[in-house]
Amino acid sequence: MAAPTATSDLMALLAGHRALGHAPASEHAWLIAHGDRRHFAVGDVVTAKGTHASELAIIFTGRLVIRMDRGAGSHKIYEWRAGDIGGIMPYSRGASPPSDAVAEEPIDSLAIPRSHFPEMIRECPVVTATCVHALLDRAREFRASDLRDDKLLSLGRLASGLAHELNNPASAVVRSAKLLNESIDASEVAAKKLNQAQLPADALAAVDDVRARCVAAAAGATPAETAEHLSPLARADREDAITTWLSKHGADLDCAEPLAETGVTFEALDALAAKMRGEALNAALCWIAAGCRIRALAAEIEMASSRIHEIVGAVKGFSYMDHAPTAEPVDVSRGIADTLTMLAAKIRAKSVHLAVDIPTDLPRAHGVGAELNQVWMNLIDNALDAVGDGGSVRVTAGRALDRVVVRVIDDGPGIPAEIRERIFDPFFTTKGVGQGTGLGLDIVRRLVQRHEGDVSVESVPGRTEFTVRVPAA
């Protein structure tokens, strides 16, 4: 028992304590009689990661903090200050902290060993009720922090993938637009020279014949002569042959590449050369080549712009940015497709063989679209991490009674039996430092439970299958 002076000091500290000050003096006296005074200096580890707290901590002064690196640098996930209660609480399961709980300011506290909890519950009902409320608040704050961090990490993964996905088509648009301006200038110069040549009708007809082949190729026609079906080596040979023809006829060799991409034949070129020669022939070929290139560049810009539009549409669909976060009928097939678009860069980087098997008549699920998409994102992303380069991931969906069932299957090494029961625990991860936070599957479990569904896993070496069941709309 504490000395009389120390007891008087502790009674005053407890009476002024923010959380427990309202408790009767008799309960304060019980805490003093059964507690031990604890002091921690700055930097002291109060509870180490992986160990279970064994005492209720009543903090009078100081600051206790849990910090953790969840992939974006260390940051605070929880703290206790003067007037708070921490450590193990009555009725709690006594889970270990996700990281060391460290004193960041000198701490003066009173510790109540767990062995006294049964008696404390009988003798100190007000203190016990306060501890239970603090436990619920702590669990709620941890859960909110987990969800917030997982969303930020998901956003980081999406931003990285989207930057990669958007970079290619955006670069293609910029490059093609620049070349388009140059080709338009070249076309205008060639058109002026062609007009000055004052060609007869049969010569103009030959020019139109060669130009028509260019237009047909740009429009997607596939005659036997088109270069679109040729291998890169065959294309290079064709370009060399056209270069030789142009050199033989004294024409501009820069016309070779755009002409080689069209279905123009050497017979057509010979017919054109039979109708004109010299500067007139060169002007005609330059005008035709510039027109071919303009159409090809316009097609590239259209294709790249369509890809950007597709990616932006996938982002909008994935995030449900124009929907309120309320339960509604959700198109699971569309959600999975948008998720795969977000992960396309990662799929390509690992050369993963992806198979998707979703029936066209799959019923809609009842839930919050953005949250269900977060489930698909975490499960598929984990599957991609599990497989090696060139591995396989399969996503299927179907209906079972009144449930929509989604399965994510990978051919990775599997989950060892001894840790299989822990994979849904918060902060548990088998990935290396900085590679995993241990939040993904915990978030999946929470979101699925929020939708009155369930998630399960079966795993053997070479096959791991996560199954999610959520109510059909």
Image (cartoon, rainbow, N blue to C red):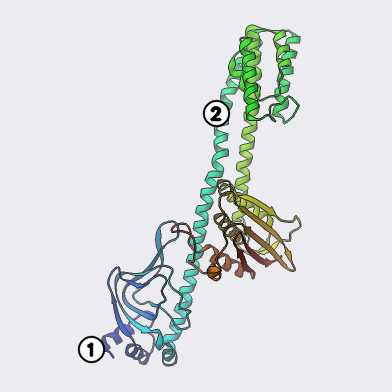
Q: Is residue 86 visible?
A: yes
Q: Quadrant of residue 328?
A: bottom right
x and y percentages locating residue 148 in the rendered image: 49, 62
Q: Secondary structure at mark 2?
A: helix
Q: Which residue is mark 1?
A: 5
Image position of 307 with respect to 435: above or below: above
Residue 431 vs residue 288, the one in the foreground: 431
Residue at the extreme front? 461
- When the figure is inspected, residue 302 is found, relative to residue 338, above or below; the finding is above
Whether residue 321 is visible: no
Q: CA distance from mark 2 to mark 1?
A: 85 Å
Residue ID at (44%, 92%): 122
Name the residue at 68% across, 24% down.
262
Q: Is residue 153 above or below residue 425?
A: above
Name which of mark 2 and mark 1 comes first in the sequence: 1
Query: Residue 14, percent across and down?
Result: 33, 84
SS for dot 1 = helix
Residue in the picture at 57% in, 62% down: 414
At label 2, the amino acid type is Lys
Mark 1: few/some/many CA within 10 Å (<14, 14-19, 20+): few
Looking at the rendered structure, the kind of residue marked 1 is: Thr
- Crowdedness near tag 2: few (<14), some (14–19) or many (≥20) residues, C-alpha within 10 Å: few
The numbered dot on residue 28 is: none
Observer-nearest residue: 220 or 311? 220
Q: Position of residue 1 (x, y in %)?
A: 29, 91
Residue that appears at 44% across and 73% down: 96
Q: Which residue is mark 2?
A: 178
